[in-house]
Image (tube, rainbow, N blue to C red):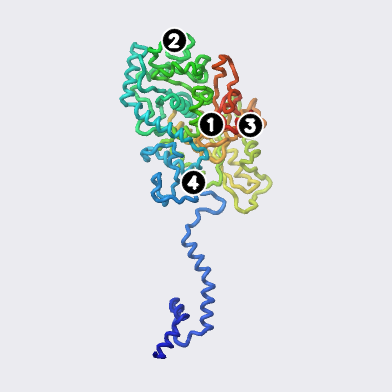
Amino acid sequence: MDLSVSRSRRRISPYNTILATLGAPLKSGLITTMNLMKILAALLVSLPVLVTLSLVLRSPPPDRIKGFADARVIQRLTPNDTSSSNSEDGFSDHTQMPKDTLHDGLIAPGFDEGSCLSRYQSNLYRKISPHKPSSYLLSGLRNYEHLHKKCGPHTKSYKTAMAQLKSSDQGNSSVRGSTECKYVVWISYSGLGNKILTITSAFLYALLTNRVLLVDPGKDMADLFCEPFPENSWLLSKDFSIKEKFNKFDQKSPHCYGNMLKNKKKTSSELVPSFLYLHLAHDYDEQDKLFFCDEYQSLTGKVPWLIMRTDNYFVPSLFLMPSFEQELEKLFPEKDSVFHHLGRYLFHPSNHVWGLITRYYQAHLAKADERIGIQVRTFESGPSPLQHVMNQIYACVFKEKLLPQVDKQKPVVTAPSGIPKLKSVLITSLTSGYSENMRNMYWEHPTVNGDLIGVFQPSHEGHQQTDKNLHDRKAWAEMYLLSLCDVLVTSAWSTFGYVAQGLGGLKPWILYKPENQTMPNPPCHQVMSMEPCFHAPPFYDCKAKRGVDTGALVPHVRHCEDMSWGLKIVGSHESHDQL
């Protein structure tokens, strides 16, 4: 072996190899043990810096400082989502879209996404609901959609039923036998909150009786809401033969069901009216209310067309009817989730309204750690209720620790942690006084705990303007924005607040109605359930045929917190606590 070659190999192995890899000069005889130790020490010192730089460059930069919330689109992501790129909802993991794009199965697949952006985007702004629809409800909705496709406007079955109705309208007041499809026609009536609640009531009745719901578009229904059913419209066609009579229907109309019962007008099993007018508005009488008795459903079940006018959320009375009891139990094992599920199924803001919602949300609410919605609606006449209602709001939010109080003695207060929380308060009201008062308070004084409070109000229209298009767009947008909040404070008797709490799955603190310009004590109370209140229920025992307290018949139908004579559905736990 050549000794010179052997020495050369020894020089570059093993330390010289490491140095050559690192770019150190290899000069024979110059690399000493001391030099080698210095180089290794330098490497050990620089290694943590290199590791830190690699982690920083690899990880995405944070969007905000600690303590400020990301937009809810980020909150909605599932931390442990390990699904493949070909997920069931059609979105891949890299899009960072949440999996629940169909609202726990409430929404049927196959809609054109561009025609109704809110249907698929709303889950980016709303927390995942802990309330899951039953498989029986989902199956019932799919069956209904098949029925609506078969019997809805412009279908063969619809044209046949229309021809029979038109024939009866021209002189033959009754029809023989049964038709293939039967309908509930909802007449556009009252304010927007009432409309949303009553359409839900009518749809549940249609679901229970195997009927098709058709909605009178009125002046702006088509502009406010997307079509909820695939492949066919829910809007009543313009050529509906008796549409021009809707405004003339009242309790004295010959086809009014209550009037027929009052006059004891009977029909044979072979000959039934072509249609019935159901007057279920707040001013209905005892005969009209018999609609909620099973024995009086026998005739309505045979009539092809039921024309309904109502401003009541009458769902609680359906839960008191024995004929519907088993079906409702299977549809809604969580009884106080009726409007929460059906509302999210039926009502999707149109693209016009969705633009109002998303622009406002991103501008004012998206970055908050917590969103507090306060809905103010007063029903008092006389002097302005601003001062005592404002006092009531403060008493409520401070007592329940929904918002922090202010420190009027110090110019600056720092939170103990040094990092404040950002809370956005969304106030909806017909007037601007409430939001201005709260905004000024939190601007002029620091909070006692250092939280930062932003107060926002989208509009202040002055007074309710029913059926005015832009007004209704704003109202619907504000209801929906309230439903995206984490906490709600709402006003007694207001269907506006009921819609927001139901869509959001929230149990709000409800502001009791003031009396004699005086703040109530206590100022507010958290409600038993997220269900709306039925303001004008019947108080009648159909079996005993006498008056009765219908809020004491079953554990899951109780009196409302804000209206002692009203009825609402409560859950099993809440109903047990009330007994």
Furthest toward the right, the residue is 409
Q: Which corner quadrant holds the N terminus?
A: bottom left
In the rendered view, would you say 353 is above or below 57? above
Q: Secondary structure at mark 4?
A: loop
Report the mark closest to the observer, 1 or 4. 1
Q: CA distance from mark 1 to mark 3?
A: 15 Å
Q: Three-letter amino acid code at disc 4? A: Arg
**CB atoms of marks 3 and 4 within 8 Å:** no
Q: Which mark is residue 335?
A: 1
Location of residue 555 with respect to 115 vertically, above or below:
above
Using the image as rendered, state which of residue 77 and residue 359 is in the foreground.
77
Going 34% across and 11% down the picture, which residue do you hit?
171
| Secondary structure type for disc 2 | loop
Judging by the rendered image, the residue that carries numbered circle 2 is 266
Earlier-in-chain disc, 1 versus 3? 1
Position in image of residue 323 (x %, y %)? 49, 22
Q: As shown in the figure, which amino acid type bears the numbered disc 3?
A: Asp
Q: Nearer the viewer, residue 261 or 321?
A: 321
Sequence-wise, which precedes: disc 3 or disc 2?
2
As measured in the structure, the alpha-carbon distance from the residue carrying label 4 to the one carrying label 2 is: 57 Å
Whichever of callouts 3 and 4 sits on the residue coming sooner in the sequence is 4
Q: Residues within 10 Å of mark 4 (few under 14, many from 20)?
A: some
Q: Disc 4 designates what residue?
A: 76
The local crowd at label 3, few if under 14, some if 14 to 19, many if 20 or more residues have their Cα within 10 Å, is: few
Question: Mark 2 belongs to which amino acid?
Answer: Lys
Q: Give the percent coordinates (x, y) of residue 176.
A: 35, 14
Amino acid of disc 1: Lys
Give the mark toward the camera: 4 or 2.
2
